[in-house]
Image (cartoon, helix red, strand yellow):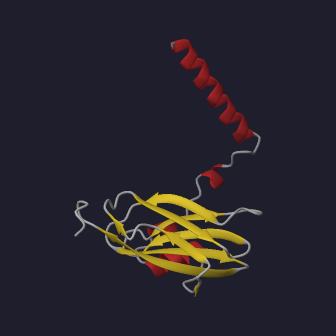
């Protein structure tokens, strides 16, 4: 059994090394990190760091699917979708988190404007979705109430 694990790990390491040396796996792309955006302590700074502006246009073409009441703030399922044409990125923020920026998802080509993830929320606040389309930024908000200990209070 040990020999099989050794061979499997050796082959996996070799594949990653080959991908890295051939340029298929670029560390900057894999470990994309926007320090200014993730270090921001308020929504405006997080928006400025992640999308370059604080100004967005409200849109009813962005749909945020999240529970109205989240019994466990550590695992809040959130789905963002949009009917805007040519969406190139979706950014998710949680207004009252210590670190408001949840993530930014870049879309290429004819990718569907759809992102589903689970986020951590410290307390009741708005979840903000920002979609970039045609060089403009559109946003939508939804309040998610986080209960203490899942007791509905």
**Residue 132 x/y as whole percent:** 65, 75
Using the image, determine if residue 95 lies above or below residue 35: below
Q: Which residue does the image show at 35% across and 58% down from the upper left?
A: 74
**Residue 32 x/y as whole percent:** 59, 58
| Residue 96, image quadrant | bottom left
**Residue 131 x/y as whole percent:** 62, 74
Depth check: give the residue in front, 148 or 25.
148
**Residue 105 x/y as whole percent:** 60, 63
Using the image, determine if residue 2 lies above or below residue 42: above
Total numbered circles: 0
Q: Which residue does the image show at 25% across and 67% down from the upper left?
A: 152
Using the image, determine if residue 51 lies above or below residue 117: below
Depth check: give the residue in front, 13 or 109.
109
Q: Which residue does the image show at 39% across and 61% down from the upper left?
A: 120
Q: Which residue does the image show at 72% across and 34% down from the upper left?
A: 18
| Residue 4, image quadrant | top right
Q: In the visual, does 132 lie left or right of 147?
A: right
Depth check: give the residue in front, 86 or 35.
86
**Looking at the rendering, in which quadrant would you find the C terminus?**
bottom left
């Amino acid at each position: 059994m040990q020999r099989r694990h050794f061979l499997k790990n050796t082959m996996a390491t070799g594949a990653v090394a080959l991908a890295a040396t051939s340029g298929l796996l670029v560390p900057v792309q894999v470990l994309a990190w926007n320090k200014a955006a993730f270090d921001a302590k308020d929504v405006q700074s997080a928006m400025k760091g992640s999308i370059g502006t604080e100004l967005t246009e409200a849109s009813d073409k962005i749909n945020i699917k999240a529970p109205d009441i989240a019994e466990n703030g550590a695992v809040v399922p959130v789905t963002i979708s949009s009917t805007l044409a040519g969406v190139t990125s979706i950014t998710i923020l949680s207004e009252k988190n210590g670190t408001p920026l949840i993530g930014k998802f870049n879309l290429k080509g004819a990718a569907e404007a759809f992102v589903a993830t689970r986020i951590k929320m410290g307390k009741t606040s708005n979840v903000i979705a920002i979609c970039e389309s045609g060089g403009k930024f559109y946003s939508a908000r939804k309040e998610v109430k986080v209960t203490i200990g899942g007791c509905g209070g």
